[in-house]
Image: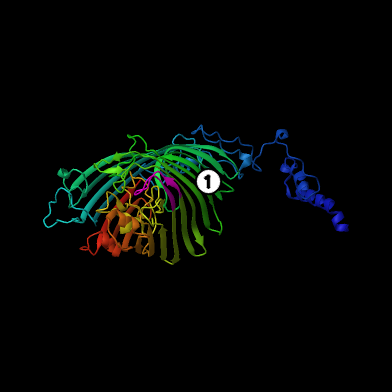
Amino acid sequence: MNAHLRHRPAIAAALICGLAALSTPPQIRAQDASAVPHLLELFGVLPAPTYDPSQSEIPRRRPGHPYEAPPEFKVVNPNGIPPAPVDQAGAFIPVPDRWRIMESLGFKFPWYDPYNQNMYKGDKPIDGKDHFLVLTGISDTFIEPRSVPTPVAPQNTGNPGEQGVFGGINQLLLVQNFIASVDYYEGDTTFKPPNIEYKATLAFNYNRINTRETRAVNIDPRLGTDRDDGFIGVQELWVDKHLRDVSSRYDFDSLRIGIQPFSTDFRGFLFQDSQPGIRLFGNRDNNRWQYNFAYFRRLEKDLNSGLNDVTKTPRHDDILVANLYRQDWPWLGYTSQATIVYNHNSDGTIYDSNGFIQRPAAIGLQLPRKYDVTYLGYNGDGHIGRVNLTVSAYGAFGHQDHGVFVEPSTSIRAGFLAAEASMDFDWIRARLSAAYASGDKNAHDRRSSGFDAINENPIFAGADTSYWISQAVPLIGGGGVALSQPNGMLADLRSSSALGQSNFDNPGLRLLGIGADFDITPQSRVTGNLNELWFDNTATLEALRQQANIGRSIGTDVSVAWTWRPYFTQNVIVRLSGAALRPGSGFKSLFSSDHSLYYSVLANVILTY
């Protein structure tokens, strides 16, 4: 060891003692002599003692000042966490009542302000602990002038010159929905799900429709061409119990019971509805895996509003669902889902509130039907590099006690494919869409190969701005069914999506589309879509209409929509859209060739609190 290192402790001690003696006035040298050992410890001359708070008799104080007792604070929130001790200043400690920090700083917000801290929007607990309340109110208003193929009433028509099958096509629809929701839950949900949650949602609907033909809106021709109707439906009423956490990152298992919304896939192709059921769900591996096991029994609905009718006995329509999601597979940023859905239906006869029969559908044999069908599906959603991609594929397998045209039974073998790819170019998103639903090739054999969903609501190819997807087009002269349902893409020949049964004897569909979204400003977006539509096979249409050589082309569907969000949020949304269908050879074969264009115009205002 070097000499100057060997003698460093002694030299340091001498220097410290000498400096202390020279620089300290005689009257205070004695009382500060205790500082010398601390300096020796600092320079390594003496070893530092082990600190034991229980043996300490000298309280902390500022040098040169007497000890001051900590101030006494008045307890204003007995349920809050107490303040940190003075010797833990700067440590990571819980904040006392962190929910009301803004209030303590003088920030006060009115109860009707949903953007800032609000007790009624779940921003802070309602009781000072961990119980939260979220109140939601929605007003959804839309007006829609439209033209739809409409039959002349069998009794008579009030319009001169209408002696054929087809009547006036112009209609006007007004709909007002008020939705009120209460969501109450317990638990600190910053990083984990709530311990228990209750939710109830009621919807009030008023609708008015004006047509040009009697019996278009009611079976009794004396009620005229207009209809006013209102209904209150229970859309949600469920309790969600958090069963357990299975990891330190709050992977969990939960059980939800009651009327609850559910979708079997990303775009609502197969089943999207709010129905009573039991659902076990959760996740694993830091949310990379998610799963659902669910059972639903469908409610009857009010036809004119589409809302749940809890005053009637539930349908004999049971749905079992099992699906599994995997994030970042097979590519980073892409989510894959495998799903199995089983649907058993044995519904009896029912007439809707307008007097028309809904089950069994007024086509073919017109006998009550029972069917069991299993859907096997794969769905994917996400992006591959710059390309956003959604895909969906379903196979339907099962049997029914009889088909639409034949007895005693038929087997169900049908398929569905859909894909939508898009790419962003600065403020423009370009989009390509394609869909295929198999059609029945022979109406009178014992195989039903037309694909049908349970209750579809597709967010695809323009969605409800598209004429074909938004409108119910009736099959005039072929029975009391529609070619397509409102908010539906499939050509399924059902009486209605709300009350009817799935129909696997249908012409199917093919769709190719292009579209684009233009974000003109952060508040304003313009969307355009162009879809070309065909029937997959027209055998069932020819059998129902007793008409040969019906073409496959449905037509060209063009739509444009403008969406405006004045406050950059979803609280105020104004939307204007227009769509037109230029009929193809198949559409012209089914309906009058007098009309070269069918249209719909939609004005929609949504206000949300």
Query: Which residue: 52% across, 64% down?
Result: 385
Rendered location of residue 285, percent (x, y): 59, 48
Q: Nearer the viewer, residue 58 or 244?
A: 244
Rendered location of residue 432, percent (x, y): 42, 64
Q: Residues within 10 Å of mark 1 (few under 14, many from 20)?
A: some
Asked which quadrant contains residue 311, the reply is: top left
- Along the horizontal axis of the image, is 5 left or right of 407? right
Query: Which residue: 46% across, 58% down?
Result: 390
- Along the horizontal axis of the image, is 42 left or right of 581? right
Q: Is residue 404 magenta?
A: yes
- Return the residue at label 1: 291
Q: Is residue 374 visible?
A: yes
- Along the horizontal axis of the image, is 366 left or right of 331? left
On screen, 102 above or below 167?
A: above
Quadrant of the image for the N terminus?
Answer: bottom right
Type of the residue with mark 1: Tyr
Q: Is residue 9 magenta?
A: no
Q: How is the image coloured?
A: rainbow
Residue at the extreme left of the image, as rendered: 160
Q: Is residue 603 visible?
A: no
Rendered location of residue 553, percent (x, y): 32, 64
On screen, 98 above or below 393?
A: above
Rendered location of residue 377, percent (x, y): 49, 52
On screen, 184 above or below 475?
A: above
Q: Nearer the viewer, residue 171 or 383?
A: 171
SS at mark 1? strand
> Which range is magenta?
397-413
Asked which quadrant contains residue 35, the reply is: top right
Q: Nearer the viewer, residue 139 or 483?
A: 483
Asked which quadrant contains residue 27, the reply is: top right
Residue at the extreme bottom of the image, as rendered: 425
Q: How many badges with numbers are in the image?
A: 1
